Image (spheres, rainbow, N blue to C red):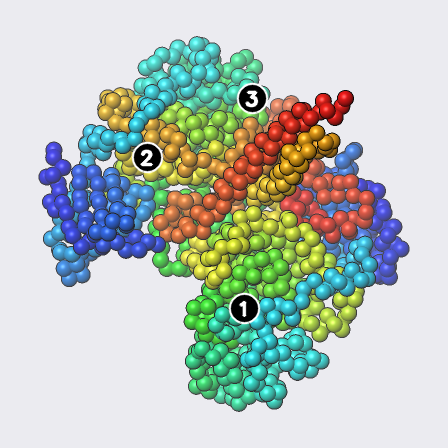
């Protein structure tokens, strides 16, 4: 298929762009296969480049012959284009609609994107699973694993979807591991699987205990039995204790996000309305639930020295939220930029979180949700909450989290395409697209994501999960509804304070060295 | 530490007659084996001795080495409640005006009752003389005390604004408080206004509070004036009052009209007309634009804050409960309405150059709030430490905000109590959140002021008017808070403040979308340590800045030395080595490692240690039936470290003090977030 077929009107003059907190821009609107571009005739004003893939939905309005298209993006931005001419407007709108909902993955922008920077470190080669699990080598030997079980992740397949993560020795917890899985397929008649029991029980040494954290409530887990799923019977897994936590299923999340964003965009200026909508969206409750469960998992490992197995239904959504957050709490390495990338690569991409399905639509989608759900965004929100509570313990700042959110939903890079490793291999992403990591890890880009207050902290960091302590993530949800001038100023000032301090420190140190040198040169004279 | 307590008793014994009169109320000076329960986790309790003194309730923990202490000022106690007795003993809950909640469990019923009766009486003083500020005696001489009252000078503040000038002057009419006994002695009025006009106008205003100047804008001569409501009823007029407003309008030569802002909801103002009060009729006054703003009255605000406090004190609430509670309290809606009123006035003054007269009913609650919020928005000076002190001294203290009534300093009308000044401080906090670089002070400063408004530790916020304070000889008998805060200003500085910024000089234009208003956790959950970020950006930056200053000094020193060395290299030189070892991780020190390393009850405390009854009741049914490892012999590390951190906390505020404990609180009674137990 040619994109040209979809683009009925490639270019319109005299289009006016309205964006909140920015001056309006008049210019020429161009549609390309992957971008909506608006450039003004003045050279100095910036151009708008919007990926079609970033467009969540559009609305058209007409006043006389002046058409207006309201473009709602997956990164939650809303812009307005005034287009003279009804026909032009209709053409543009239908083109955008078609181009933003392409079905075929191979038509996505990453397959066409050629980087304007030199790829120094190829992100596709950066995180190989063996590397990510290298601390575990000795343990992995115990298990009948091979490459395929690690990669293959077939859905609903009992326990194949296992990954291991070890508590590092720094936590003084010996031999505690965190594992994730999908639900066991016990069904209503209580099927057993000797191999599964053996595998699960084998992870524990004699006399050790483990916890199975089921992210569903007991009622939901019971219901799952009727569909062939279920949970571990304690009799069959004697060393394990099961805990149920109530993280809701991903389909409810989408609704929650839609309501939250609607509340944030509410123009009524009524306090009651805002708070009741915020409450009704349930988003903050979900943040609390997930953080609580992650803390619990971390607590079992750190405080009890027990192993933990986390699963929900499929082990590709809430399970990943819990295991990855627990690692951020426990492991200082995950709080560095590189470590966080490794975490996303291992706990999300390789663990088979279906990014493509989950991020197909965002908060402005009109249609009935299929498998869309902001599971990853919710995880990032939880990370942000911990970051807020420990502002000195993370190497990165919230910009990195926001960037991941953007790229998970629309990107020029291939990293978040596909739903699992198998799909990605089939799509030949590593040959045909550029990895997000190749771009992020360039020193020029990294600078933007560095937290000036970072001071490595080897402790386990226990966040507060009280409602008073959890905040709305304004950087994402109110990002386009506020001017960041004052906040940017504060950030700059912070960087300035710290840089000035470092500069002085260097100066003082070098002067001191000079003085010491002079002193030693002089000292023979002084002490005859 | 126990030593301190003993010394304190001795001093007090020898001290005053107040002591003896108060002693009568103390049925039970000392109770042994009392347990202090940590609100965040009932597992953490301390056993110790409870002392009741004339001024404080003191709990001394029974640790071996590091005795922990908790001091609660009686004047900060809001109410004392007996809870249902359990097998553990008899619980007594103390709610404080600074939002601290303390729970003691007393072993004997008779002691329980006696402590309750004593505390109930002690926390409700009947006479001003019983208040702590009259017995508080830091180690300073008379001259120093008098000097402390000169720290702020309102005359200087008016002259900073550019007054008096050719249009405005001080009137001597209220020198003896005869025209208006709730106003200050010195008042600014237009020069063109004659004495009969002032008197006539005052007779036409509630409580004689005639229109007078609150803020003057040098740049464009626009003013904010304040008064009480006119006694207009349905049709009454007063020529002098009309002339007064006309004179105010004319004292702003650039403008052709003025705003009259009634901060009440229209309905309330109309209801007042039936009582012969009311609001200005636009037809009778020349060139005024009349405006209602709709801030609710003190009773609504009191109830609203009560609800908010209940929400903030919920034990492990769900997100839904918390947000619903926040919404139902309506608190943030009220804050928003006060802010919007301030914005309206500040814009009128700065952007339109139009003068504004503000009033409510009596002109000492909403009017004070709105005038001072507008001033903070208008004038960068009020965003400095000294400026905020001056503003409170001017708009609140001197203009007769009824601190004694509103804060409930004395036992009396509960209906007079209202968190009016809390709301002003919160508006400033909300602004600080929106403009992180524009305020010289940080939120600790606001919290500290809040604490002292209620503590009765200093004389500033005692009584309801300047006249009352003069009659009581407050300046002779008590100390002023302001120099004390000024001495501790390092704790109150905002490291991000950029004083020399051009945008900083002008008007603040805050956003008022509902989501711009946030719950003030640091105030309402001030004593719930585990709810606050475990690392503070502010503290880190302050540490870095302090270090930077030392580095600057070191740099100068080294440069000097180097210059000297270069000159006379062979000469003997005293080397000061290691003045500043370049320390790594200097700013990571504010991390409270004990806290960071302490998990909360994420599943209701069943992991390690006894199950927590409270949390289990609260709907963790699934977990209850799976109560894990209750049999586990080793109580988890979590528990131990919790207790350690608790102890560290208790002892933090009085470690190694040799002087009177009361002096300890002079030094740093509340600004220290890590040792908040001293009240």
In the image, residue B577 above or below residue B178: above
Q: Chain of mark 3?
A: A
Q: Are marks 1 and 3 on the same chain?
A: no
Q: Nearer the viewer, mark 1 or mark 3?
A: 1
Q: What is the spatial separation of the Cα atoms under label 2 and label 3, in whole angstroms?
A: 33 Å
Q: Could you tell me which quadrant the N terminus of chain A lies in?
A: top left
Where residue A149 sits in the image (x, y, percent)?
34, 16
Where residue B493 sits in the image (x, y, percent)?
60, 50
Identify the secondary structure beneath mark 1: helix
Q: Are marks 1 and 2 on the same chain?
A: no
**Would you name the residue on which mark 3 appears?**
A170
Which quarter of the picture shows residue A319? Answer: top left
Q: Residue at x 54, y 68 (%)?
A: B371
Q: Residue at x 56, y 85 (%)?
A: B192
Closer to us: B622 or B606: B606
In the image, residue A517 above or below residue A375: above
Q: What is the spatial separation of the Cα atoms under label 1 and label 2, in whole angstroms?
A: 49 Å
Q: Chain of mark 1?
A: B
**Would you name the residue on which mark 1 appears?**
B371
Residue B53 badge = none
Where residue B68 sits in the image (x, y, percent)?
74, 40
Q: Residues within 10 Å of mark 2 (few under 14, many from 20)?
A: many
Tell me if I can see residue A271 in this picture: no
Identify the secondary structure beneath mark 2: helix
Mark 2 or 3 closer to N-term?
3
Where residue B652 sits in the image (x, y, percent)?
71, 41
Q: Residue at x 30, y 37 (%)?
A: A409
Residue A408 badge = 2
């Amino acid at each position: 298929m040619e994109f040209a077929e979809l683009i009925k009107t490639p270019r319109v003059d005299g289009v006016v762009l309205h964006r909140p907190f920015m001056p309006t821009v008049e210019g020429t609107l161009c549609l390309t296969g992957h971008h909506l571009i608006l450039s003004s005739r003045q050279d100095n004003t910036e151009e708008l480049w919007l990926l079609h893939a970033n467009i969540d939905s559009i609305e058209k309005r007409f006043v006389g012959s002046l058409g207006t298209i309201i473009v709602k993006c997956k990164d939650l931005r809303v812009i307005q284009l005034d287009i003279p001419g009804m026909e032009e407007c209709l053409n543009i709108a239908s083109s955008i609609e078609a181009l933003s909902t392409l079905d075929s993955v191979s038509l996505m922008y990453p397959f066409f994107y050629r980087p304007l920077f030199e790829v120094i470190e190829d992100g596709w080669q950066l995180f190989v699973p063996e590397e990510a699990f290298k601390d575990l080598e000795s343990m992995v030997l115990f298990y009948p694993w091979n490459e395929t079980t690690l990669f293959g992740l077939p859905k609903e397949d009992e326990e194949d979807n296992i990954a291991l993560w070890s508590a590092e020795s720094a936590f003084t917890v010996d031999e505690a591991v965190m594992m994730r899985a999908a639900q066991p397929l016990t069904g209503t008649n209580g099927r057993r699987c000797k191999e599964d029991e053996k595998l699960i029980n084998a992870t524990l040494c004699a006399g050790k205990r483990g916890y199975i954290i089921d992210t569903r409530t007991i009622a939901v887990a019971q219901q799952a039995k009727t569909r062939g799923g279920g949970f571990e019977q304690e009799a069959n897994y004697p060393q394990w204790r099961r805990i149920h936590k109530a993280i809701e299923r991903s389909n409810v999340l989408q609704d929650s996000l839609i309501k939250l964003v609607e509340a944030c965009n509410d123009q009524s200026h009524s306090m009651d309305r805002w708070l009741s909508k915020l409450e009704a969206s349930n988003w903050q409750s979900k943040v609390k639930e997930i953080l609580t469960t992650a803390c619990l998992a971390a607590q079992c490992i750190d405080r009890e020295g027990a192993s933990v197995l986390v699963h929900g239904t499929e082990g590709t959504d809430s399970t990943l939220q819990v295991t990855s957050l627990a690692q951020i709490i426990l492991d200082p390495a995950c709080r560095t930029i590189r470590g966080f990338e490794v975490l996303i690569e291992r706990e999300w991409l390789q663990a088979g979180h279906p990014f493509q399905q989950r991020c197909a639509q965002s908060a402005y989608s009109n249609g009935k949700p299929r498998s869309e759900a902001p599971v990853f965004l919710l995880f990032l929100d939880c990370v942000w909450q911990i970051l807020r509570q420990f502002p000195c313990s993370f190497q990165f700042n919230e910009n990195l989290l926001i960037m991941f959110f953007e790229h998970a939903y629309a990107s020029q890079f291939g990293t978040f395409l596909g739903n699992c490793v198998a799909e990605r291999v089939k799509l030949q992403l590593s040959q045909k697209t550029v990895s997000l990591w190749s771009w992020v890890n360039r020193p020029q880009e990294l600078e933007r994501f560095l937290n000036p207050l970072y001071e490595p902290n080897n402790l386990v960091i226990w966040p507060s999960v009280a409602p008073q302590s959890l905040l709305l993530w304004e950087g994402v949800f109110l990002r386009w509804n506020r001017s960041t001038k004052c906040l940017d100023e504060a950030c700059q000032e912070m960087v300035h304070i710290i840089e000035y301090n470092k500069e002085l420190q260097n100066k003082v140190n070098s002067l001191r060295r000079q003085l010491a040198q002079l002193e030693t040169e002089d000292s023979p004279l002084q002490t005859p | 530490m126990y030593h301190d307590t003993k010394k304190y008793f001795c001093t007090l014994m020898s001290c005053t007659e107040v002591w003896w009169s108060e002693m009568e109320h103390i049925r039970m000076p000392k109770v042994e084996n009392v347990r202090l329960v940590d609100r965040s986790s009932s597992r953490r309790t301390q056993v110790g001795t409870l002392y009741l003194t004339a001024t404080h309730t003191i709990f001394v923990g029974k640790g071996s080495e590091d005795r922990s202490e908790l001091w609660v000022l009686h004047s900060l106690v809001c109410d004392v409640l007996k809870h249902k007795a359990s097998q553990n003993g008899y619980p007594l809950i103390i709610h404080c005006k600074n939002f601290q909640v303390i729970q003691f469990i007393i072993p004997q019923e008779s002691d329980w009752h006696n402590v309750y009766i004593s505390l109930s009486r002690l926390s409700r003083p009947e006479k001003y003389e019983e208040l702590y500020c009259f017995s508080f005696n830091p180690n300073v001489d008379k001259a120093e005390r008098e000097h402390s009252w000169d720290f702020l000078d309102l005359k200087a503040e008016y002259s900073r604004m550019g007054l008096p000038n050719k249009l405005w002057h001080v009137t001597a009419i209220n020198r003896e408080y005869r025209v208006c006994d709730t106003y200050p002695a010195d008042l600014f009025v237009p020069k063109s206004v004659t004495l009969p006009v002032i008197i006539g106008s005052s007779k036409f205003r509630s409580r004689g509070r005639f229109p007078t100047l609150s803020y003057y804008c040098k740049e464009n001569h626009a003013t904010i004036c304040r008064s009480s409501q006119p006694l207009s009823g349905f049709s009454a007029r007063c020529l002098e009052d009309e002339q007064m407003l006309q004179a105010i309008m004319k004292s702003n030569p650039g403008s052709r009209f003025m705003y009259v802002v009634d901060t009440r909801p229209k309905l309330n103002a109309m209801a007042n007309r039936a009582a012969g009060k009311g609001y200005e009729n636009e037809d009778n006054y020349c060139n005024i634009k009349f405006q209602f703003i709709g801030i609710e009255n003190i009773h609504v605000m009191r109830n609203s804050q009560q609800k908010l406090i209940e929400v903030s004190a919920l034990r492990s609430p769900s997100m839904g409960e918390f947000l619903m509670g926040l919404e139902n309290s309506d608190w943030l809606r009220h804050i928003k309405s006060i802010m919007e009123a301030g914005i309206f006035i500040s814009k009128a003054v700065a952007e339109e150059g139009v003068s504004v007269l503000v009033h409510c009913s009596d002109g000492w609650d909403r009017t004070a709030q709105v005038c001072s919020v507008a001033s903070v928005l208008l004038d960068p000076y009020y965003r400095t430490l000294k400026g905020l002190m001056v503003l409170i001294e001017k708009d609140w203290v001197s203009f007769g905000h009824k601190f004694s009534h509103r804060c409930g300093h004395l036992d009396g009308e509960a209906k007079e109590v209202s968190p009016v000044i809390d709301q002003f401080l919160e508006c400033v906090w909300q602004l600080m959140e929106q403009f992180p670089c524009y305020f010289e002070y940080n939120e600790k400063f606001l919290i500290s002021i809040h604490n002292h408004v209620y503590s009765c530790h200093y004389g500033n916020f005692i009584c309801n008017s300047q006249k009352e304070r003069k009659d009581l000889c407050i300046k002779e008998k008590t100390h002023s808070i302001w120099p004390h805060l000024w001495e501790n200003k390092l704790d109150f500085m905002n490291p991000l403040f950029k004083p020399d910024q051009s945008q900083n000089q002008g008007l603040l234009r805050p956003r008022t979308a509902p989501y711009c208003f946030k719950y003030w956790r640091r105030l309402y959950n001030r004593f719930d340590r585990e709810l606050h970020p475990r690392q503070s950006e502010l503290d880190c930056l302050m540490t870095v800045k302090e270090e930077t200053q030392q580095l600057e000094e070191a740099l100068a020193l080294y440069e000097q030395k180097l210059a000297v060395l270069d000159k006379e290299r062979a000469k003997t030189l005293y080397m000061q080595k290691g003045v500043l070892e370049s320390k790594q991780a200097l700013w990571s020190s504010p991390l409270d490692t004990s806290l960071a390393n302490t998990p909360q009850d994420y599943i209701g405390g069943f992991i390690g240690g006894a199950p927590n009854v409270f949390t289990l009741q609260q709907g963790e049914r699934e977990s209850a039936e799976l109560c894990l490892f209750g049999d586990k012999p080793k109580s988890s590390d979590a528990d131990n470290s919790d207790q350690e951190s608790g102890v560290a906390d208790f002892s933090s505020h009085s470690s190694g003090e040799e002087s009177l404990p009361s002096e300890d609180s002079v030094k740093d009674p509340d600004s220290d977030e890590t040792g908040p137990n001293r009240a």
